[in-house]
Amino acid sequence: MKNIVVRTLSGIVYLGILIGSLFLGKYGFGFIFLLIILLSLYEFYGLARASGASPFVVPSLVAGGSLFVIIF
């Protein structure tokens, strides 16, 4: 039960940050979204490492961030 409360509260905080970043303009929103993407990728690769895989973290973060910037 405690885990779901923590997840709900963190989801509310992230939602507030995303909605707040809309008021920063196009580039402010893009920067906040880029940070969220990079943190999500880093957490994903941490989970992959915990399961025994050995992903290329830094090149993948650079590729993911670059892909977002190019598309943005």
Image (spheres, grey):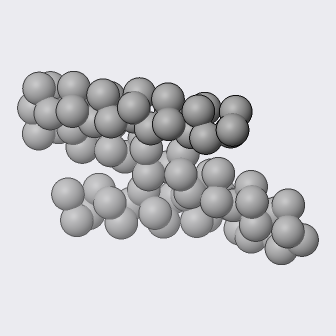
**Most extreme residue toward the bottom, as rendered?**
53
**Quarter occupied by the N terminus:** top right
**Most extreme residue toward the right, as rendered?**
52
What residue is at 69 percent from the left and 61 percent from the top? 45
Q: Can residue 69 be seen in this snapshot?
A: yes
Dividing the picture into quadrants, the one containing residue 29 is top left
Dividing the picture into quadrants, the one containing residue 12 is top left
Q: In this rendering, would 14 be left or right of 28?
A: right
The mark tally for this picture is 0
Where in the figure is residue 57, as x and y percent of width and height? 68, 60
**Quarter occupied by the C terminus:** bottom left
What residue is at 24 percent from the left and 43 percent from the top? 30
What residue is at 46 percent from the left and 63 percent from the top? 64
Q: In this rendering, would 58 be left or right of 29?
A: right
Q: In this rendering, would 12 be left or right of 26?
A: right
Of residues 17 and 53, the one nearer the viewer is: 17
Q: In this rendering, would 7 be left or right of 57?
A: left
Where in the figure is residue 39, as x and y percent of width and height? 54, 45
Residue 9 against residue 50 in the figure, above or below: above
Where in the figure is residue 25, as x and y percent of width and height? 10, 32
What residue is at 59 percent from the left and 33 percent from the top? 5
Q: Can residue 28 be seen in this snapshot?
A: no
